[in-house]
Amino acid sequence: MDKKGMLFQIVSTLGTRVVVLFGAFVVSVIMARLLGPEGKGIITAILVIPTLVVTIADLGIRQATAFFIGQRTYEQRDIVSSLTFLWLLTSLLSVGIVTVIFLLQYSGQYSWWLLGVCIMTIPVNLGIQYLRGIMQGRGRIGGINRVEIVKTALNFIILMLLVGWLGLGVFGAALTQLLLLLVTLVYSFGLLKGEIGFSIRVVKPIPQMLIRKGFAFALALFVIQLNYRIDIVFLERLTSATEVGLYSVGTNIAELIWQLPTAIGLILFSRSAGSKTTEAAVARTSKLIRLVVPTLVVCGTLFWLMAPVMIDLMYGSAFAGSGTIIRYLLPGIIIMVIFKLLHADLSGRGAPLFSMRVSLLALVVNIVLNLMLIPGYGAIGSAVASSISYGIAGLLFVWLYVRREGIPLRSVLLPTAEDRQEIRAKLGKLRARIAPSG
């Protein structure tokens, strides 16, 4: 288990996310230029189904694993043995379901080599998710960060080899995802093998408890993920592959902002799962939001101003429409940061379903607005729909959270005098360290 404090974990995780963000940006630019808007749209549309099914098939078991290990509810070796059995079961079911969906939706449209590669990402992805749950429960944030760095480097190398050098196009992009996940799975397994034993053994009632507790996590996460991805489904049906490609580039760039709070949420979940008191978890979460959101607002404003120029320079004139999409998405994405951090805290404390009402309302709003706006405005209409949906989710959830915890709204949204004093003190220490001696 990592022995470092929370501040060190946040700083190291944020550093990791910066590397990952840069790598994802570079890969996104290269893939877009190699495949073009249509090819980018095809690979995005095909991978949506496996991604959503993995979200369901995960059954929230990753979060439940982290929760039970963090709470020390059962023996760790018994949890891992039962988890291995559940991985085999969920992988078989998921592959079968996606195969049927692809038969009904894409039969005759794309080759089965392409569809087969996308299908095989499912069991590998599930394995990575379950191993991540073990690491998170054990507080192995450093191990998770190392996995992310390796994954980022491999993504670039394999993509350049298969799509850039060998010219395998859309099939090469799909194969990149599969090989990337396979190597990541093996590396993650290697990080944990020396600490815990892996075996396939059902230890009652652990599988039932993992599924029961995990179902709440899975249901909440599925609705949230569906709200993030439902726009791609509507765009694919109501517009062209080119529109999907433009929108996917816009969302990929805009959602980079989410990576930093996602990294913090990873630590927040782990810390909340092991919190001794509710008050400590709420105080920790509120403070993080007060510090993170103002920073993201400033960065988001700069991002909004520079988006069209960045898209033109990095992706080329063919993707010019993506800059406008980013501008419409940004307000909702920044507000949604609050939702993500609050949800991480409540999930870590075993209450993932508290967000369900908000998530369902946001999803309904997103669907209705997509159906209204896409026919007339295409990808831009979808961006407006998503931004409004995210904004509603973030603002409503923070209101429900402060009511649940019995705290004032300002304690979550407005930096306090103590926050400012602490920031000045830390900046002073930082300047003292980097100042030249003498």
Image (tube, grey):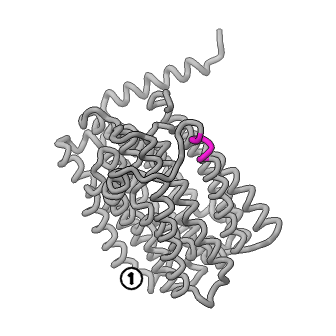
Front residue of 402/141: it is 141
Q: Could you say where residue 151 lies in the image, as x and y percent from the top left?
A: 64, 51
Residue 115 occupies which quadrant of the picture? Answer: bottom right
Callout 1: few (<14), some (14-19), or many (20+) C-alpha neighbours within 10 Å?
some
Q: Where is residue 379 in the image (x, y as percent from the top left)?
A: 50, 76
Q: Which residue reaches farthest top?
A: 438
Residue located 47% across and 78% down the image? 233
Q: Which residue lies furthest to the bottom in this view?
A: 108
Residue 189 lies in magenta, yes or no? yes
User: For the point 34% across and 63% down, which residue is it?
Assistant: 219
| The C terminus: image quadrant | top right
In the rendered image, residue 341 lying in the magenta stretch gets the answer no
The answer to whether residue 228 of the structure is visible from this angle is yes
Total numbered badges shown on the rendered structure: 1
Q: Where is residue 366 in the image (x, y as percent from the top left)?
A: 36, 72
Q: Tell me the kind of residue under disc 1.
A: Leu
Residue 264 is situated, as x and y percent measured from the top left of the image, at 45, 43
Q: Can residue 338 be seen in this view?
A: no
Pick the residue in front: 357 or 197: 197
The residue at the point 63 percent across, 59 percent down is 310
Which of the pair 194/178 is nearer the observer? 194
The range drawn in magenta is: 188-193
At 42% from the left and 28% from the top, the residue drawn is 423
Local secondary structure at mark 1: helix
Dividing the picture into quadrants, the one containing residue 393 is bottom left
**Helix, strand or loop for the magenta stretch, by majority:** helix
Query: What residue is pinned by disc 1?
Result: 371
Q: As displayed, is residue 406 above or below residue 57?
A: above
On the rendered structure, is 416 left or right of 79? Answer: left
